[in-house]
Amino acid sequence: MCVVQAGQVPKSVEASLKARIGALTQRVFDAEAAIVWVVVPEGSGFTAALPSRTVITSMHANRVLESEEPASLLKTLGAICMEEIGCNAEEVVNSVRDPE
């Protein structure tokens, strides 16, 4: 799942971000990403209701992760988001979790 503010991520960047996340899940989990793209209306849900390039991602693994994997995945996912959206590390909120 990716959560962004309306008007802050162009469609071309959205497509590229989804493709790169899909490539990551294919490489790490041998599975396609089922990405849910959530757009928060401008003025809602972000700091002081100002325009924000913040991205929130939540990745659900399809297997139990080895002890070092979550940190590596979070670092890689953060780098992808920063490169694609142009935000900084303080504007990226990521989570990765094992299946239930």
Image (cartoon, rainbow, N blue to C red):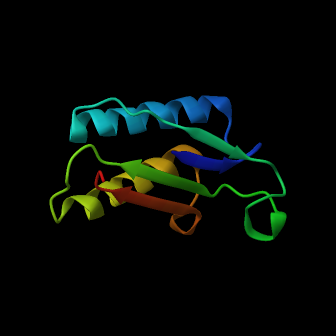
Q: Residue at x 27, y 61 (%)?
A: 70
* Residue farthest left in this picture: 66
Of residue 56 and residue 79, the one placed in the foreground of this image is: 56
Indicate whether 22 appears above or below 54: above
Indicate whether 95 appears above or below 85: below
Q: Position of residue 31 (x, y in %)?
A: 28, 31
Q: Residue at x 36, y 57 (%)?
A: 96
Of residue 44 and residue 82, the one placed in the foreground of this image is: 44
Indicate whether 12 appears above or below 73: above
Q: Position of residue 88 (x, y in %)?
A: 55, 62
Q: Residue at x 74, y 69 (%)?
A: 47
Q: Residue at x 80, y 58 (%)?
A: 44
Q: Position of residue 74 (x, y in %)?
A: 36, 59
Residue 96 shown left or right of residue 48 in the figure: left
Q: Position of residue 91 (x, y in %)?
A: 58, 63
Of residue 57 and residue 98, the one placed in the foreground of this image is: 98
